[in-house]
């Protein structure tokens, strides 16, 4: 029996069946930042498909308390693609429903780092919508027991990008969701970090020691990774740095970071800025998670239906008990 022929025929039958399906409507319900602290949910048209594109029905999208908070509050420095009205989001999980050039991918659950597929609004990041059109190579298949935790992969890749170097950080500043992921990535790579946190509500749920910086007497940290976004952090961290040590700025700073030069001079401080993650960083954290070395559990603390987007963003940005909030698109009618 020619099983190869049978498999080929089965694939062709599947492809023809998919080809006969009507193309999905190219429109979506999208979260829109209409202006400073003004959030709406409204219907917007999507751009036509180009070669290699896929259509994804979204399941969850994460709310970033870093860059998205600055866009929401109006504090984000201007850069290309910025402007209102704007679709936020770069932490999306969805299911491929249409893939003209790759029909076998229909049904895959994928991670989406953002999209620029909206007509009439800015798509800076752009994953917070019920449906997206994205290049197929930007829709990364995931196989997680809890697919919603895949929304954390962008932050995990950011953490990996920041700390993957010759010396793993032994101090992390900040115990929000990014700080926790930084600590977990360091542990997955063989390190043993300490974390600074000043908010008592955020000191629990740790996988490593968490201390108030006022109680830390160490002066020998070889590498310090800051994710606090505090522009004054360098002068707070410098006394605790070993001579020749490195400080990594992995947060996003709305005002210019500054430091006391004489202390930096005596310490021979090295300073590094960690920017956006690269595809290799995403590959690395997906592999770490699949191998059971990187734990993504217990970090999503709140979920909100898309119809409550306005209040959800306020909660994500102003409620200190909220580590990570997901927008749930599964109940949105298309």
Image: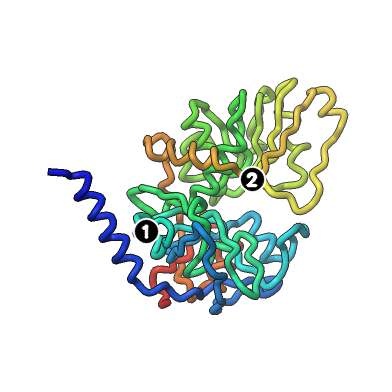
| Position of 222 relative to 250 (above/below) | above
**Is 24 in front, or is 333?**
24
Q: Is residue 140 visible?
A: yes
Residue 225 relative to residue 78: left or right: left
| Gap between marks 2 and 1 measured at Cα | 31 Å
**Is 71 in front, or is 260?**
71
Tell me residue 202's x, y (percent): 54, 49
Looking at this view, name the residue that lies furthest to the top.
243
Q: Which residue is mark 1?
A: 103
Q: Which mark is residue 272?
A: none
Q: Which mark is residue 276?
A: 2
In this figure, which colouring scheme has been used for the structure? rainbow
Q: Secondary structure at mark 2?
A: loop
| Position of 90 relative to 294 (above/below) | below
Which quarter shows the C terminus? bottom left
Q: Residue at x 79, y 23 (%)?
A: 267
Of callouts 2 and 1, the N-terminal one: 1
Binning the other alpha carbons within 10 Å of mark 2 as few (below 14), some (14 to 19) or many (20 upward) gives some
**Is 243 in front, or is 219?**
243
Q: Secondary structure at mark 1?
A: helix
| Position of 236 relative to 80 (above/below) | above
Q: Is residue 303 visible?
A: no
Looking at this view, name the residue that lies furthest to the left.
1
Tell me residue 47's x, y (percent): 57, 70
Q: How many marks?
A: 2
Tell me residue 291's x, y (percent): 37, 35
Residue 226 relative to residue 211: left or right: right
Q: Residue at x 45, y 57 (%)?
A: 93
Tell me residue 38's x, y (percent): 65, 75
Binning the other alpha carbons within 10 Å of mark 1 as few (below 14), some (14 to 19) or many (20 upward) gives many
């Amino acid at each position: 029996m020619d099983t190869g022929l049978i498999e080929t025929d089965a694939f062709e039958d599947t492809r023809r069946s998919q080809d006969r399906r009507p193309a999905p409507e190219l429109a979506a319900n999208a979260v829109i930042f209409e202006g400073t602290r003004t959030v709406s949910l409204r219907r917007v048209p999507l751009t036509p498909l180009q070669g290699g594109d896929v259509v994804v029905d979204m399941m969850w999208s994460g709310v970033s308390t870093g860059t998205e908070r600055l866009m929401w509050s109006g504090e984000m420095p201007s850069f290309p693609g910025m402007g209102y009205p704007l679709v936020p989001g770069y932490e999306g999980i969805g299911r491929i429903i249409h893939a003209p050039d790759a029909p076998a991918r229909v049904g895959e659950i994928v991670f989406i780092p953002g999209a620029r597929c909206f007509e009439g609004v800015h798509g800076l990041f752009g994953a917070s919508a019920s449906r997206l059109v994205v290049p197929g190579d930007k829709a990364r298949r995931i196989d997680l027991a809890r697919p919603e935790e895949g929304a954390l992969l962008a932050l995990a890749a950011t953490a990996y990008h920041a700390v993957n170097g010759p010396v793993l950080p032994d101090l992390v500043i900040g115990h929000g969701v990014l700080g926790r992921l930084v600590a977990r990535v360091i542990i997955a790579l063989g390190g043993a970090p300490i974390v600074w946190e000043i908010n008592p509500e955020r000191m629990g749920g740790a996988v490593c020691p968490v201390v108030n910086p006022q109680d830390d007497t160490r002066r020998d940290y070889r590498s310090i990774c800051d994710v606090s976004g505090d522009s004054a952090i360098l002068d707070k961290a410098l006394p605790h740095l070993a001579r020749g040590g490195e400080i990594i700025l992995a947060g996003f700073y709305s005002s210019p970071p500054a430091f006391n030069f004489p202390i930096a001079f005596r310490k021979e401080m090295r300073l590094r800025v960690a920017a956006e993650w690269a595809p290799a960083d995403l590959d690395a954290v997906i592999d770490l998670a699949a191998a059971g070395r990187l734990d993504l559990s217990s970090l999503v603390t709140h979920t909100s239906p898309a119809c409550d987007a306005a209040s959800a963003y306020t909660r994500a940005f102003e409620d200190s008990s909220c580590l990570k909030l997901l927008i749930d698109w599964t109940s949105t009618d298309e």
